[in-house]
Amino acid sequence: MRNLILVFSLIFLISCKEEVQPKPIAYLGLVYPTKSYEKLKLKRPYSFQVLKNTTIINEANNWLTIKYPDLKASIDITYRPINSNLKELLTESEKLVFKHTVKAEQIIPKDFANPKKRVFGSIYEITGNAASQIQFHVTDSTNNFIKGSLYFYAKPNYDSILPAVSYIKEDILHLIETLEWQDPS
């Protein structure tokens, strides 16, 4: 009888524990700084506003790199003057976009035009594990042509970088909206 009471006591003590619940899957909380823009300080045939917490790298031929050190990303800006070669520049720009079709799930083009500022162009969102997730080009269709590409310094994993792509896409749209061509004088 004593053994029976001991066995029941042990079973009762062991069975009175709280049930162990598995922890829910946790997601990384991404917090980006509040956006504040400033006008590009470099003298170029163009000007636009850039995010203040980026690093601007001055390149030759009026090119530049806008670095996002915390996101390990950059927007590479190439400038080319138009010398009766607009069609060639547009074709080259689109070829660079469609080189990503091997890894891209989808390429979504969007055209834009601001006749008042003489800014015309296209932006391409590239979904999937492509090397560049956003590419764009803008022109005044007579003198100036800019091509831009977003790159991350990591092996592309689209699901992981999607929040950063969305964050930088806003900056690219702001860049295009604030773009102004400078007089050559």
Image (cartoon, grey):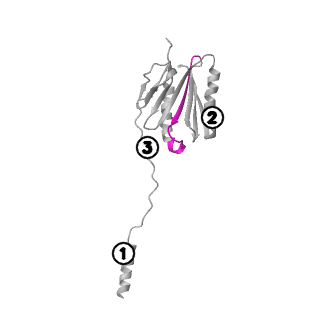
Tell me the SS state at disc 1.
helix
* Residue 156: in magenta span: yes
Residue depth check, mark 1 versus mark 2: number of the one nearer the observer: 2
Give the crowd class for mark 2: few <14, some 14-19, many >=20 residues within 10 Å: few
In screen coordinates, is 134 left or right of 10? right
Question: Can residue 79 be seen here?
Answer: yes
Q: Which mark is residue 122?
A: none
Residues rendered magenta in the picture: 142-161
- Name the residue type under label 1: Leu
Residue farthest to the front? 60
In which quarter of the view is residue 130 placed? top right
Tell me the SS state at disc 2.
helix
Q: Which residue is mark 1?
A: 13
Residue 16 vs 78, above or below: the answer is: below
Question: Can residue 112 be seen here?
Answer: no
Tell me the SS state at disc 3.
loop
Rendered-image quadrant of the N terminus: bottom left
In which quarter of the view is residue 22 placed? bottom left
* Disc 3/disc 2 C-alpha distance (Å): 31 Å
* Disc 1/disc 2 C-alpha distance (Å): 67 Å
Mark earlier in primary sequence (1, 2):
1
- Number of numbered tags placed on the structure image: 3
- Name the residue type under label 3: Leu
Give the crowd class for mark 3: few <14, some 14-19, many >=20 residues within 10 Å: few
Q: Which residue is mark 2?
A: 99
User: How far across and how far down the image is residue 89, in percent?
Assistant: 62, 23
Q: Which mark is residue 30?
A: 3
Q: Residue at (62%, 29%) from the top-left corner?
A: 94
Q: Residue at (63%, 16%) from the top-left corner?
A: 84
